[in-house]
Amino acid sequence: MIVKQTTLTVTENTRLADGIYRLRLAGDTSAITAPGQFVNLKLSGFFLRRPISCLLYTSPSPRDRSLS
């Protein structure tokens, strides 16, 4: 198993329902190849990483093209 560490930018953090959020990240997401994979987020001020599952994944995202 190869572990890739990269810095991503949060582009969206929207509350969908009580305790459910949509989090969109931008950056080098080449290690994510399919829905169902997990990413472990390292957050400042927290010792443990937070596992987040990937529901949808598109590469490159249509939104990314509009930002170029």
Image (tube, grey):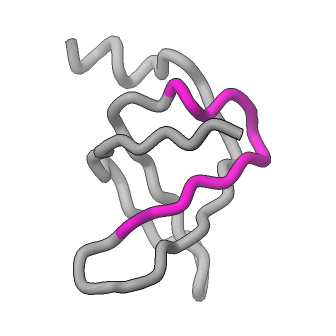
* Relative height, residue 61 to residue 18 (above, below): above
Q: What x and y, as percent, mark residue 44?
A: 24, 75
Q: Please report the residue visible at 38 percent of the width from the left and 24 percent of the height from the top.
A: 63
The quarter of the displayed image where residue 5 is located? top left
- Looking at the image, which residue sits at the far right? 36
Point out the stretch of residues depicted in magenta. Answer: 30-42
Percent position of residue 38, x then y: 67, 54
- Along the line of sight, the residue nearer the viewer: 48 or 51: 48
Residue shown at the point (63%, 37%) measured from the top left: 2
Q: Main secondary structure of the magenta part?
A: loop
Relative height, residue 7 to residue 30 (above, below): below
Quadrant housing residue 64? top left
Q: Relative to residue 49, is residue 67 drawn left or right?
A: left
The residue lying toward the viewer, choosing from 47 and 25, is: 47
Q: Residue furthest front?
A: 1
Q: Is residue 44 above or below residue 11?
A: below
Image quadrant containing the C terminus: top left
